[in-house]
Image (cartoon, grey):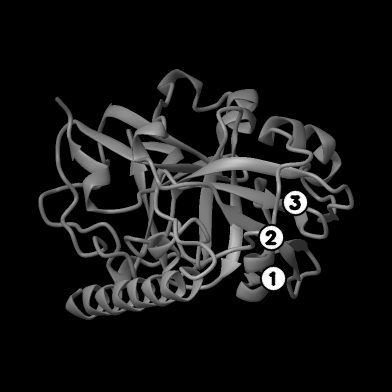
């Protein structure tokens, strides 16, 4: 835990130095400091579509067993970051939302939270990136083919990512909405399709395996991918998924009624709550 926090402090220091250095270099031509040290400042809003429209355009690539699709149109999305890697539970991805839906963007880089905090608005140029699903969860990246022959969008290299996005003003977390998860629709396929990938909250639920001793993600309980699934309300269709590398992996799960906030992703027909940091779980009021 202490090592992870130390690494985060080092990242923060590097980002701060880089930002200050860049601003100093830009001051001669841009005394206002509006030229950001990350991303592609030359990108302009030209053909913005909503996430809902994007999913409709590439619906054939978002259906199980179909291939990942290259985005050939010169289109963009304008979105806000709702989830990042600040707590160590989301790895090489950010979650974004524009009010019409959410989607994951896969990036081969750590410390994304340093320049893509929750509430940061970004413009993303999608041409020549790829869209598809992993376990039916829509995401954007570059194609990766598994040993079994299944292709899904995976982590684009950081150089490619820097070319494809632009920071739009300062981060404003107050502009990010947390949607109430409808517990009565756990088994509703349309509800899952519409809301997977969004920042949501499940209120007044119980962690089925909480007993005052069990933690979120001990290594001995790993089931796959260095992560542990914990059932919510004794359901097999709604779980909290926690990486063993998360800052709160060793935290004892709270007993009784709790509120769980996170990015509600899916793996096939199972909702997986990816909590972002310690404050994303608390006793229900």
Q: Earlier in the sequence, mark 3 or mark 1?
A: 3
Q: Image check: 275 left or right of 115? A: left
Question: Label for residue 91?
Answer: none
Q: Nearer the viewer, residue 214 or 12?
A: 12
Q: Secondary structure at mark 3?
A: strand
Question: Label for residue 132?
Answer: 3
Q: Nearer the viewer, residue 242 or 142?
A: 142
The residue positioned 65% from the left and 24% from the top of the image is: 190
Q: Where is mark 1, residue-wise?
A: 160
Q: Position of residue 274 (x, y in %)?
A: 41, 49
Q: Residues within 10 Å of mark 2 (few under 14, many from 20)?
A: many
Is the N terminus in the top left, top right, bottom left or bottom right quadrant? bottom left
Q: Where is mark 2, residue-wise?
A: 164
Q: Position of residue 158 (x, y in %)?
A: 61, 73
Q: Tally the numbered discs.
A: 3
Residue 4 at least partly seen = yes
Q: Secondary structure at mark 2?
A: helix
Q: Nearer the viewer, residue 181 or 47?
A: 47
- Are discs 3 and 1 less than 8 Å apart at CB? no
Q: Position of residue 212 (x, y in %)?
A: 10, 50
- Are discs 2 and 1 less than 8 Å apart at CB? yes
Q: Residues within 10 Å of mark 1 (few under 14, many from 20)?
A: some
Q: Position of residue 97 (x, y in %)?
A: 55, 38
Q: Image check: 116 left or right of 41? A: left
59 in relation to 170, above or below: above
């Amino acid at each position: 835990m202490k090592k992870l926090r130390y690494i985060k402090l080092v990242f923060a220091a590097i980002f701060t130095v880089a930002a200050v250095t860049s601003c100093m270099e830009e001051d001669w031509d841009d005394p206002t400091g509006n030229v950001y040290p990350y991303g592609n400042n030359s990108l302009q809003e030209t053909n913005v579509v909503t996430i809902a429209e994007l999913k409709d355009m590439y619906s054939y690539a978002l259906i199980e067993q179909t291939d990942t699709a290259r985005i050939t149109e010169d289109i963009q999305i304008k979105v806000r970051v709702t989830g990042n890697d600040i707590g160590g539970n989301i790895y090489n991805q950010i979650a974004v939302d524009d009010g019409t839906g959410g989607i994951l963007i896969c990036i081969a880089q750590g410390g994304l939270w340093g320049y893509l905090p929750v509430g940061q608005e970004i413009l993303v140029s999608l041409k020549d990136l790829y869209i598809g699903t992993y376990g039916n969860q829509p995401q954007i990246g570059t194609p990766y083919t598994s040993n079994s022959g299944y292709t899904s969008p995976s982590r684009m290299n950081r150089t490619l990512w820097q070319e494809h996005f632009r920071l739009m003003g300062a981060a404003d977390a107050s502009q990010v909405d947390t949607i109430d998860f409808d517990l009565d629709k756990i088994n509703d396929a349309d509800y899952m399709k519409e809301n997977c990938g969004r920042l949501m909250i499940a209120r007044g639920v119980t962690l089925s395996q909480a007993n005052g001793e069990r933690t979120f993600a001990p290594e001995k309980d790993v089931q796959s991918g260095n992560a542990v699934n914990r059932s919510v309300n004794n359901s097999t269709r709604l779980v909290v998924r926690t990486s063993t590398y998360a800052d709160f992996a060793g935290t004892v799960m709270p007993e009784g009624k709790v509120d769980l906030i996170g990015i509600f992703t899916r793996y096939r027909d199972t909702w997986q709550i990816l909590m972002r940091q310690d404050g994303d779980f608390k006793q229900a009021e």
